[in-house]
Amino acid sequence: MDLHHVSASLGILHPLCIARGRNAEVWDEEGNRYIDFIGGIGVLNLGHGHPTVVEAVQAQVETLMHSAFNALPHRGYLEVARELDAFVPVAYPLSCMLTNSGAEATENALKVARGATGRQAVIAFDDAFHGRTLAALNLNGKVKPYKSGLGTLPGPVYHLPFPSPDSGVTSDQAMDALTRLFEVEVPADEVACVIVEPVQGEGGFRPLCPRFAQRLRALCDAHGIVLIFDEIQSGFGRTGARFAFPRLGVEPDLLLMGKSMAAGLPLAAVAGKAALMDCLPGGGLGGTYSGNAVACAAARAVMAVMTETQLGRWGSRQEVAIVAAYQRWQASGRFPMLGAMTGIGAMRGIVFEDTESASGAEHLAALLTAAREAGVLLMPSGRRRNVLRLLAPLTTEPEVLDEGLARIEQALETLQP
């Protein structure tokens, strides 16, 4: 694979070039078959080339490929906005802006929060990931590789420990840190928003503590702070439900969506309460490609396919298979580097621990290579890159899912204890 004309800063994970894909299977340019447990980093919850999406996209290409919505509206954008109101489980009428990427949704959410509150400070969390654009970078909860060498980033941004059963941080500890923040670093009446993932993606598939989420919601209400949930990775079916936030028992003021929203076409959104979304002057939100007509057609097909019944069935099937395989691997005693399983539903990670022979990150890096050679594609996550994240399409056929898990086990057997 010739990468001479591609920036080395992209950091390619697997040295191969994919030529075609079908659901959870992909083939490289040399014809080698792989089972895809990366799924475009959470973009392909419906798999490669879902027929309903393909049909919708092909039909749209034949009628209208693009119109810049700010200048000349088109029906696709209007219909996606209307259907999101029914698809997103909040009690209030939803107002939205479509964007090209999750990072762009994050940036616009910051603009909305600032415009609505007249404040600047933002609270984010350790190990968070919200994008690679400049303001989004400062929200991310780790330095390497995203912030290295960039100097001062847009702010002010303050980070709190992320409370989760998988992080070892309790609700009380996180609330104590928030109290300290307001007493020592920044007063509550200068904070525009709090942004948090209901399930961390890059952070290692760790679910937010529901008790903390409820206390955070009450605190934001008391101080006029905008609460933003980032469901760019956990949303659109990844956990086996449309979104992960309902399990927290609270609703956000703004919700960020992306990745699997359009099944592989570039589309994302920031949506929430109209009083917030309408706070900037006309022209304050928008973008040349935002809400592209073909991407909107894909998103409408995705929402039609992702019924609660379908997602529940797919998610349960995948969760059962993954948890059973993990428990079998752990019980065998053959893989001492395997630590805890993280996540909820079908959004699962596996922590790799240090052993005498190697660090957890080194074990996982070796697994990625061995698994690729065995025919399954994997990727890491976590601050130390020692958490395996499993992102097979929800639509993966049971026999293909079982085959992929068996190939992971085959690859684990090659690791040194």
Image: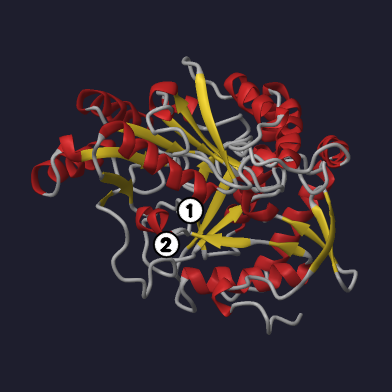
- Extreme front residue here? 71
Secondary element type, mark 2: loop
Residue at screen point 47% across, 15% down: 91
> Can you say whether 29 is above or below 107 in the image?
below
Nearer to me, 409 or 203: 203
Residue type marked 1? Gly
Q: Quadrant of residue 388?
A: bottom right
- What quarter of the picture does the N terminus occupy? bottom right
> Can you say whether 323 is above or below 243 in the image?
below
Label 1 Cα crowd, 10 Å radius (few <14 / some 14-19 / many 20+): many
What is the CA distance from the residue labelled 2 to the residue labelled 1?
8 Å
The numbered disc on residue 172 is none
Q: Coloured how? A: secondary structure
Q: In which quarter of the image is residue 225?
A: top left
Left or right of 374? Residue 184 is left
Secondary element type, mark 1: loop
Residue at screen point 36% across, 75% down: 149
Instruction: Note whether residue 209 is visible.
Output: no
User: Residue 215 at x, y = what percent?
Assistant: 27, 28
User: Residue 117 at x, y = what percent?
Assistant: 27, 33
Q: Quadrant of residue 412?
A: bottom right
Marks 2/1 in contact by CB < 8 Å: the verdict is yes
The numbered disc on residue 383 is 2
User: Residue 280 at x, y = what percent?
Assistant: 39, 33
The mark nearer the N terminus, 2 or 1, is 1
Residue that badge 1 annotates: 204
